[in-house]
Every structure is written in C-alpha cells, then in structure tokens.
Image: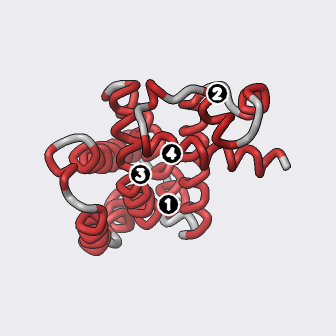
C-alpha cells in the first residue's frame, strides 16, 4: 500500500506541475488531488522537489531495467521523457534556477554514464581521468540539448519533432561509447 501511495503522490505532483508553476503548488494541493492527508504526504516525501526527484529516479530505474543498463538507450529515453514533460522542467528551472537544474541533471547523467562504463570495461583498468572526461562529455551534451529544447530557442518545437531528433542522435551515436572505451584500453 505504501508504494501505491508514493506512486499516486508522484503522479499527482507531475500532473499539477504540468499545469502550473511549482511556486504555486502546495503540499495541500497535492494532498487534495491525491485524496490523502498532508501527514501522509510528509511520510513519503519532504517537499515537492523531493517528489519530483522520486519521479525522475523512478523513470531512470525503469529505463535502466528496460534497456538492461545500455546507457545510450537509457539516456535517449530519459531525454524523450523529459521532453514530454518539458513544462515540468521549465517550472523547475523557474523555481530553482539554472544552477540547481544543471547540477541535478548532470548528477543523474553522470550516474548512468558511470554505470555503463563500469559494465563495459570489466577486466580493464581505466584511468579515472579518462572516465571523468567521458562522463563530463555526456553530461554537457545531454544537459545542453535539454536546455535548448526545454528553456531556450527550440522550445517551440513539437514533442514529435524532438523525438525525431532524439532518434537521429541515437542512430548517429550508436556504438560510440564502446568505441571510446576500446580507445581507452589501448
């Protein structure tokens, strides 16, 4: 029952964040929308941002499981999911600022990149510096795309147009991480 309540809170919060600014959403709004008490909300989450963090982490875990940890596919699904919910990301940007959002997104991407690199480089000794360079590359690239599509000049593109671009990126960069790791082994 506890997991169902947690999921319901995440779903309600996401729906509310699609409709209005995070600055205007209260815990009472979420509790009313979910049909729970405020104390039930606080049993599961500390605040609205904690709920959204739970949403993102649940999606990353879901994509990671679905694609057996293949970072490229997980990242592409994460981007696609983010674009579908770009209003929420824009609201996060407005509420918390670019610095917070950048740190948040890059931390998630770093985590995924590190998992994939470890998985693909089993049995090899890789330089910490090289691993950090790869992680930084993916962090900057993905965050830059998200900002372009969510906040900046390309926010007028439709979700379908962006999904098409994501599919092209996936095709263009397919196998690149494997190539990078094989180059590191030399």
Q: Which label was assigned to residue 121? A: 1
* Residue carrying label 2: 28
Classify residue 20 by image quadrant: top left
Query: What whole-number distance in Å separates the C-alpha atoms at marks 4 and 3?
Result: 21 Å
Could you tell me if the residues under marks 4 and 3 are in contact, i.e. CB atoms within 8 Å? no
Residue 78 horizontal/vertical position (percent):
44, 56
Q: Secondary structure at mark 4?
A: helix
Residue 124 horizontal/vertical position (percent):
50, 58
Query: What whole-number distance in Å separates the C-alpha atoms at marks 1 and 4?
Result: 16 Å
Q: Secondary structure at mark 2?
A: helix
N-term mark: 1 or 4: 4
Could you tell me if the residues under marks 3 and 1 are in contact, i.e. CB atoms within 8 Å? no
| Left or right of residue 179: residue 32 | right
Q: Secondary structure at mark 1?
A: loop
Depicted 71 relative to depicted 85: above or below: below
Q: Secondary structure at mark 3?
A: loop
* Residue carrying label 4: 111
């Amino acid at each position: 029952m506890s997991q169902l309540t947690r999921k319901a809170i995440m779903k309600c919060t996401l729906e509310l964040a699609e409709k209005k600014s995070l600055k205007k959403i209260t815990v009472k709004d979420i509790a009313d929308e979910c049909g729970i008490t405020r104390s039930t909300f606080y049993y599961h989450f500390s605040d609205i941002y904690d709920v959204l963090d739970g949403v993102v982490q649940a999606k990353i875990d879901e994509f990671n499981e679905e694609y057996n940890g293949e970072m490229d596919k997980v990242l592409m699904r994460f981007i696609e999911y983010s674009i579908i919910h770009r209003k929420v990301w824009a609201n996060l940007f407005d509420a918390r600022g670019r610095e917070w959002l950048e740190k948040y997104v890059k931390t998630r991407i770093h985590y995924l990149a590190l998992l994939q690199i470890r998985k693909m480089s089993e049995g090899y000794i890789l330089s910490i510096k090289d691993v950090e360079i790869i992680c930084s590359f993916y962090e900057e690239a993905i965050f830059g795309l998200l900002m372009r599509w969510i906040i900046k000049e390309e926010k007028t593109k439709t979700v379908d147009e962006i999904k098409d671009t994501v599919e092209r990126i996936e095709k263009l960069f397919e196998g690149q991480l494997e190539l990078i790791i094989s180059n590191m082994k030399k």
